[in-house]
Amino acid sequence: MTRPLSDLTVLVTGGGRGLGAAIARAFHREGARVAINYRNSQTAAETLAAELGPRAAAFRADVTDPAQVAAMVDQITERLGAPDVLVHNALADFAFNGDARAHLDRLQWADIARQAETAVGGALNCLAAMRAHCAAQGFGRIITIGTNLMQNPVVPYHDYTAAKGALLALTRTAAKELGPLGITVNMVSGGLLRTTDASAATPEAVFDIIAAQTPLGRVTTPEDLADAVLFFASPWARAVTGQNLIVDGGLVFG
């Protein structure tokens, strides 16, 4: 079963700013109805929703809380229609600052668990809230956001990368279980993006080094990655599931 992007209701977690906002704008551009989830970024999310107009709205929920997620999905259903697409972009507070990262001599399990609670737990909670609707209609699209640091940990952000690795595992096991229900599950993995709040702490020299090592000669933007997310929700990806598409200008292959 396929459906055009303009016929879909899309939930973007962490959608108020940065990459999430770029993804929300991309889906809206193609005619979809967009639910912009936020936890703390109320002003940014509501401003974006107002910019996009009546086919978009902002919804507050902490994705690590199953009850809040279930209530949010009910609110989205009432306002925009039951969500058919999940883009799980929400990120626990994190800054890509190599000098300030937690090294192994002081890294604690709680650091990894905090990242995984949002990356993996948030995905699980959203899946649980959306599964019945998607299964009933025989259609659903789940897109998780990963990182190319799994292929090339140029800066060893242990906690962030471990959580995203676990999210890739869940992406693939969920694809296996949900495929018979008509639900595809895929991941889009970016590199360092120019520029989001998370990458604002990255020195300019690092962006220049990455651009010089990348076949396309430039750093990937949130808009570049957002367009790749659209592919997995579109009819053209109807036979693709359990995959991890790396969108980083060719910095890493695999």
Image (cartoon, helix red, strand yellow):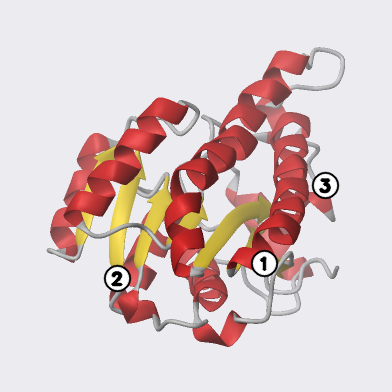
Q: How many marks?
A: 3
Residue 62 image offset from top left, x and y in percent = 41, 30
Q: Name the residue carrying label 3.
A: 153
- Please tell me which residue lies in front, 250 or 3: 3
Among the two numbered marks 1 and 2 on one chain, the one whose residue lies closer to the N terminus: 2
Q: Name the residue carrying label 2.
A: 28
Q: CA distance from mark 1 to mark 2?
A: 29 Å
Q: Secondary structure at mark 1?
A: helix
Q: Name the residue carrying label 1.
A: 180
Q: Quadrant of the C terminus?
A: bottom right
Q: Nearer the viewer, mark 3 or mark 1?
A: 1
Q: Nearer the viewer, mark 1 or mark 2?
A: 1
Identity, as a three-letter code, of the amino acid under mark 2: His
Q: CA distance from mark 3 to mark 1?
A: 35 Å
Among the two numbered marks 3 and 1 on one chain, the one whose residue lies closer to the N terminus: 3
- At horizontal 50% and vertical 80% (from top left) the residue drawn is 234
